[in-house]
Image (cartoon, grey):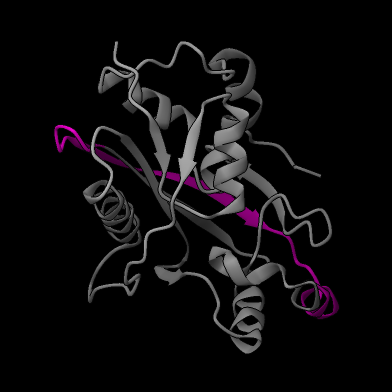
Amino acid sequence: MNKLPLILASSSQRRIDIMSSLGWKYESISPDIDETPMKHETAEQLVMRLATQKAQVVSENNPGRIIIAADSVVEVDGRIYGKPVSQIEAEAMLKEIRGTHHRIHSGISICNSSTGNIRSHCVTTVVQARRYSDIEIKQSIDRGTPFDKAGAYAIQDPYLKPVEIIKGCYSGSLGLPVCKLIEIMIDMEQDTSNTYFEKDSQCKPFCMFGEATG
């Protein structure tokens, strides 16, 4: 097994928190890419393309590293929701998403910048949103919570508590699917023996979530 230095191609606090929880030493670099969806692109295709581009951009100036990149969107009935750019857009997103049965797609790409080898995958989490009120939406916007989050909400938000049911990968719903990350790292012959993550103890209560979160 190899042990190349790691770079997380993200400035997302949620992804940083997840990476830090694994016990790995890494550097965080935020790539600058155009995240505009292409015509007829599905949500799964979008997040995988953007995650791959992020990994490739960071790898160009960082030889001899493992680059970990991810991207997430919310999909409701085929409509893709990224990060809102205004209060009006955040309010509209939250109103359209509340009470819906929808999906969170998280694309993950890992690149070995020494070899150019890159692996990508999309992990999908199914979510039932709570019917939060207009007042709760306003309070969330006033706190500034929606503006760096796909769909304008965070599953773990302790104030809005936007989700009733989660089915699938919990860490994927936060933006970085840990099980798939470790699986790809092992497939790429990278040493993961020093990670704090243990699938049996930490994966089942979250990734197999099928009960009310509250």
Query: Which residue shows up at 39% across the image and 68% down it?
Result: 78
Left or right of 62? Residue 114 is left
Q: x, y (%) of residue 207?
A: 56, 31
Vertical placement of residue 102 versus 204, above or below = below
Q: In the figure, residue 151 lies in which quadrant?
A: bottom right
Query: Which residue shows up at 83% across the image and 73% down it?
Result: 136
Residue 177 in view here: no
Left or right of 84? Residue 144 is right
The quarter of the image holding the N terminus is: top left
Residue 108 in view here: yes
Which range is magenta? 112-139
Per the image, is 132 magenta? Answer: yes
Q: x, y (%) of residue 41?
A: 25, 67
Q: x, y (%) of residue 5?
A: 37, 29
Q: In the figure, residue 90 lies in which quadrant?
A: bottom right
**Numbered-mark total:** 0
| Towards the viewer: 2 or 108 | 2
Query: Which residue shows up at 66% across the image and 78% down it?
Result: 95
| Towards the viewer: 159 or 5 | 5
Left or right of 66? Residue 161 is right
Q: x, y (%) of residue 205?
A: 66, 26
Per the image, is 161 magenta? Answer: no
